[in-house]
Image: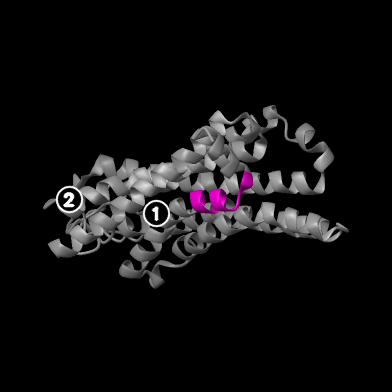
């Protein structure tokens, strides 16, 4: 690790994650709540993946991408929540430098992949509604596979952010005011100016967060125009309902993500950011199975079929 001369710096072998509270009683209460949320999220997303794999009627591009979304949501919560649960009951809240590096990278990779996946899912709805007769021709399984591979590949851009952040010189105390190794929180411990790295993060965010969001908005403008041209009110309602779940999930994903990562560090508020990050990380992953199961007749039918009814 490079360290400029003249500063009181040392090699960092571990970080201390401060989490939410130092009160044991509060931590036990939080442990019970977060454990319930974690299990519900994993089981809910796991159920969606299982139903899509078992029911051949769900072997369509839309459900193929939904299956990937559930995998990503499971990746979100399993990257951060298990360690948070351990720290809530443990006296030691340390994380090694290597584990922090890995957690930061995986969390960022999953987030960037999900950003691009939402664009792919919007494209799927655009083709389904604007070109229904050519849907299976345009979205062939070959194209779906390539789109899926492309979304996963975009996650590797997280390596740039992680590499520059973890190469910074750090000096004590090495206490991260967060419940996991989140980039801006870790960077606050650096002994040098992080302006250049913040600019790199901003550029990545523009290309990987803002640009996909603009494409999604443009896609749904075209979708709305196509729906309004339908003569039957029943057909309009059906078309809008197929997009409602996707729009709901996008809103709950992009709103907190934009707040957290598209703003200057001068407005950084550790306690508020932990709450927003918790919603962005845990509650959104739990919301997806609820939205896609309660509003989706195909998922309900597949569930009853698998249960033997």
Q: Is residue 307 left or right of residue 192?
A: right
Question: Percent from the top left, x then y, of residue 307?
Answer: 49, 35
Q: Is residue 211 left or right of residue 100?
A: right
Which quadrant holds the C terminus?
Answer: top right
At 58% from the left and 31% from the top, the residue drawn is 55
Let me know if residue 261 appears in the view. yes
Category of crowding for the residue at label 1, using alpha-carbon neighbours closer than 10 angstroms: few (below 14), some (14–19), many (at least 20): many
The residue at 25%/59% (across/down) is 30
x and y percent of residue 259 in the render?
47, 65
Q: Which residue is mark 1?
A: 282
Picture layout, residue 208 above or below residue 134: below
Determine whether, in the image, residue 45 is placed left or right of residue 296. left
Residue 203: x %, y % from top left: 53, 55
Q: Which residues are magenta?
A: 288-297
Disc nearer the start of the sequence (2/1): 2
Q: CA distance from mark 2 to mark 1?
A: 34 Å
Q: Where residue 160 is drawn, which disc sits there? A: none
What residue is shown with label 2?
Answer: 10
């Amino acid at each position: 690790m490079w360290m400029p001369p003249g500063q009181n710096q040392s090699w960092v072998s571990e970080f201390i994650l401060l989490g939410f509270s130092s009160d044991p009683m509060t931590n036990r209460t939080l442990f019970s709540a977060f454990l319930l949320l974690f299990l519900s999220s994993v089981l809910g997303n796991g159920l969606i993946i299982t139903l899509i794999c078992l029911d051949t009627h769900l072997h369509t591009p839309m459900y193929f991408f939904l299956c990937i979304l559930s995998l990503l949501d499971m990746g979100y919560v399993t990257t951060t929540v298990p360690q948070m649960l351990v720290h809530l009951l443990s006296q030691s809240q340390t994380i090694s430098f290597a584990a922090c590096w890995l957690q930061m990278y995986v969390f960022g990779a999953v987030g960037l992949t999900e950003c691009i996946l939402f664009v792919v899912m919007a494209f799927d709805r655009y083709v389904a509604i604007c070109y229904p007769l050519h849907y299976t021709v345009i979205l062939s399984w070959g194209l779906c596979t390539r789109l899926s591979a492309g979304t996963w590949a975009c996650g590797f851009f997280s390596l740039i952010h992680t590499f520059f952040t973890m190469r910074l010189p750090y000096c004590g105390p090495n206490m991260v005011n967060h419940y996991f190794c989140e980039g801006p929180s870790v960077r606050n411990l650096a002994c040098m100016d992080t302006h250049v790295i913040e600019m790199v993060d901003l550029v990545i965010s523009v290309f990987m967060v803002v640009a996909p969001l603009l494409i999604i908005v443009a896609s749904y403008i075209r979708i709305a125009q196509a729906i309004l041209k339908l003569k039957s009110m029943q057909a309009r309602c059906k078309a809008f309902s197929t997009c409602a779940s996707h729009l709901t999930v996008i809103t709950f994903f992009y709103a907190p993500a934009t707040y957290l990562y598209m703003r200057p560090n001068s407005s950084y508020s550790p306690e508020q950011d932990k709450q927003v990050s918790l919603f962005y990380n845990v509650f959104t992953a739990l919301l997806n199975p609820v939205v896609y199961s309660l509003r989706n007749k195909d998922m309900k039918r597949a569930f009853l079929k698998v249960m033997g009814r």
